[in-house]
Image (cartoon, rainbow, N blue to C red):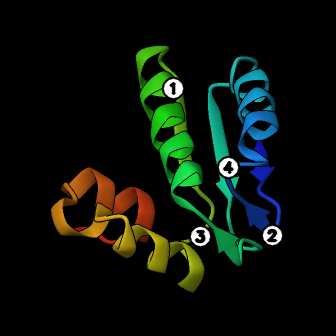
């Protein structure tokens, strides 16, 4: 199942997105997030995605991105410090790059 994020994902919209994603992931074994339309994304969105990754793993579910992080998402990852200490698993998830 694919869940597409809107163009703008920020602290104001994150609550509704969280509820939608949790509802979707509870009914499937794999959820694919599509961040391709995201052009305005903030730290709260990255935190949501990371939280859902942890939730999915703890419930035996899988989550992945449909495409590598686009320029807006990659920029937010960098500004937030995510890229400084990425594990191989993080790099594969966010950038679709293997070590």
* Mark before the other along the chain sequence, 3 or 2: 2
Q: Residue at x 70, y 17 (%)?
A: 26
The Cα atoms of the two marked residues, 4 and 1, are separated by 22 Å
Furthest toward the front, the residue is 12
Mark 4 lies on residue: 11
Q: Residues within 10 Å of mark 4 (few under 14, many from 20)?
A: few
Q: Number of labelled discs?
A: 4
Q: Is residue 50 visible?
A: yes
Kindly state the secondary structure of the residue where label 2 is placed.
Answer: loop
Mark 3 or 2: in front is 2
Mark 3 lies on residue: 67
The Cα atoms of the two marked residues, 2 and 4, are separated by 13 Å
The Cα atoms of the two marked residues, 1 and 3, are separated by 19 Å
Mark 4 or 1: in front is 4
Looking at the image, which is closer to me, 80 or 93? 80
Q: Quadrant of residue 35?
A: bottom right
Looking at the image, which is closer to me, 32 or 42? 42
Q: Is residue 96 visible?
A: no
* Mark before the other along the chain sequence, 4 or 3: 4
Mark 2 lies on residue: 7
Kindly state the secondary structure of the residue where label 1 is placed.
Answer: helix
Q: Residues within 10 Å of mark 1 (few under 14, many from 20)?
A: some
């Amino acid at each position: 199942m694919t869940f597409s994020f809107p163009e703008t994902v920020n602290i104001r919209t994150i609550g509704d997105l969280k509820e939608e994603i949790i509802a979707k992931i509870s009914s499937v074994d794999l959820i694919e997030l599509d961040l391709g339309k995201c052009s305005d994304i903030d730290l709260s969105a990255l935190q949501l995605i990371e939280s859902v990754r942890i939730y999915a793993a703890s419930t035996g579910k899988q989550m992945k991105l449909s495409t590598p992080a686009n320029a807006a998402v990659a920029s937010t990852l960098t500004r937030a410090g995510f890229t400084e200490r990425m594990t191989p698993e993080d790099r594969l998830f966010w950038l679709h790059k293997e070590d």
